[in-house]
Amino acid sequence: MKKEDLLHLRNINYRRTSGRRVRTLEQAKELVNEIGFCHFWPIKGVEMPNLFHAIAGRERPVPKKHRDPDHRKCWGWKDQALGKKWWYYGKLLRRRATLVSLDDLPAFYALSENWGDLTDYLQLYEEGKLSMEAKQVYEALLEHGPLDTIRLRREANLGSESSKYRFDRALMELQVGLKVVPIGVAHTGAWNYAFIYELFQRHFPDVPEQARSIKRSAARRRLVGEYVDNVLFTDRSMLEKVFHIYHWTDRQWDRTIESLLDEGRMVRREVEGVEGMQFVSAGSWAS
């Protein structure tokens, strides 16, 4: 199969066509459920579906002005969905804003350093896997419940201007670790806009139990397999880039890839117009 054919099918999967573009919030929900996970915005150098291009129905740069209709829909629907548990929204893959379906969320949780208890963070902190600032932010939410960003900084003793970078880094760390999640917007602060955060386990109380029976090897196969089904063709370097937050070893990657090949989920083939051997979705190759 030629690269052009696969790119055409990829655009259909991503809803980057006028006929399949996302026009309503309900269709945005359908998109996330259909593909499992995607980025909110396009990320340079990272191949993955994203909500903005699906709304635009084509590839295009993200405009700087919020008045742009595609930008306004993307941002507004995200805010409207916060707290409704239609999907997971937060910093995750590539440490960027990511949308994850509720069906895939337990697999992501199974790959995290969580064991399903609100006090898990203490062991991670003692092992040097959680920063002091992340511990302070987590404990502020644990004690006070949902907090907007302004108050959260204050309660975490990170309210000074010199602490802003450390607070932002801690919030990123906790989101990537599936420990906190934005659940709403407060009209406060200099921009009259601030996320409200809550502990992940309190917002998604069923996910830890759903994840308990999922082995990490099975979670890797599920998510990597879904990714290949969406992008249709890729190579190992891109796979490692997409899932880099997990720091999988070469052996874990080898086993995951070989399992997906053995199961017939994907095939290793040359694609005309693409340098190097590719992993191609078995369904697209057969078609």
Image (cartoon, rainbow, N blue to C red):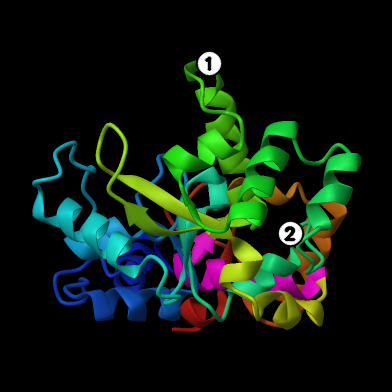
Q: Determine contact: label 1, label 2, CB under 8 Å.
A: no
- How many marks on residues? 2
Q: Position of residue 64 (x, y in %)?
A: 19, 36
Element carrying mark 1: helix
List the residue tagged with mark 1: 162
Q: Is residue 271 above or below residue 123?
A: below
In the rendered structure, which amino acid carries the disc numbered 1?
Ser
Real-space Cα separation, disc 1 to disc 2, in angstroms: 30 Å
Specify start and end residues of the magenta stretch as a single range: 216-233
Residue drawn at x 25%, y 55% as measured from the top left: 75
List the residue tagged with mark 2: 112
Examine the structure image and report whether residue 217 is included in the region drawn in magenta. Answer: yes
Residue drawn at x 56%, y 52% as measured from the top left: 92
Q: Is residue 193 above or below residue 76?
A: above
Mark whose residue sits in front, 1 or 2: 1
Q: Nearer the viewer, residue 192 or 49?
A: 192
Q: Position of residue 168 (x, y in %)?
A: 53, 33
In the rendered structure, which amino acid carries the disc numbered 2?
Ser
Q: Is residue 91 above or below residue 162?
A: below
Q: Nearer the viewer, residue 225 or 201?
A: 201
Q: Is 227 left, or right, of 110 in this rendering?
A: left
Element carrying mark 2: loop
Q: Is residue 262 visible?
A: yes
Q: Position of residue 67 (x, y in %)?
A: 8, 46
Circle 1 residues within 10 Å: few <14, some 14–19, many ≥20: few
